[in-house]
Image (cartoon, grey):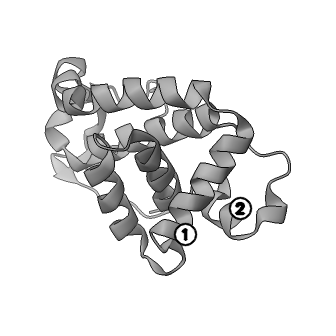
Amino acid sequence: MKPTKPITIMGKSVDRKASKKLMAEHQDFFKVAETMCKAMTVGSWIDTAKDVYLEHNIETTPEPAILKLAEAMKSSAPIDAVILYALGMNIDGFRWKLKHPAAWHNHKEAIEIFGSMKTRLCKQIYKENENTFKPVVYEMGKKYPPSEWGYTLMVDGVEVEQYGYGV
């Protein structure tokens, strides 16, 4: 079976130059927060996270509001911002674990939560800024790499609507 019309597979690749400019405003936050997270003991991390959780009434606050608060606090209180980002993104079930302290067995250290938070935040920022990507065309019938950003299928120059798992 061979297609009767030309098929083009369009992917996205992160433009490192554009992403560097985009992430410049977050670099100081990432450096300071990472340094602070490396220095925290597990006990102080949990105590600080509980304090932030209670102080900002996280139990009744919707996730978008938590993320907005985290963005506002990233330069004035970096550890609080890391905790709020982790709560808003629910990194490793963080929100549930703080609500149920008995669940803190086999918990992750501050630096591990920071790493997951940074990865998710960067991906979110990239997705919100389409100019961060450059288009990549893959040849029909050839292998192409897995992608976080998805693919667009074009049949005879017209985008095909895709259905399936996760769409």
Dot 1 amino acid type: Leu
Residue at 42% in and 68% down: 63
In the image, taking residue 141 as reference, residue 139 lies left or right, namely: left
Q: What is the secondary structure assignment of the residue under circle 2?
A: helix
Q: Earlier in the sequence, mark 1 or mark 2?
A: 1
Q: Is residue 148 left or right of residue 48?
A: left
Q: Nearer the viewer, mark 1 or mark 2?
A: 1
- Count the labels in the image: 2
Residue ID at (49%, 42%): 117
Q: Residue 73: horizontal and vertical position, in percent? A: 31, 50
Tell me where residue 4 sits by quadrant. top left
In the image, taking residue 65 as reference, residue 52 lies left or right, namely right
Image coordinates of residue 153 in percent, x first then y, are 30, 46
Task: Name the residue beneath numbered marker 2.
Answer: 97
User: Could you tell me the amino acid type at mark 2?
Assistant: Lys
Which mark is on residue 54? 1
What is the crowding at mark 1: few (fewer than 14 residues within 10 Å), some, or many (at least 20)?
A: few
Residue 139 percent location from the top left of the image: 33, 25
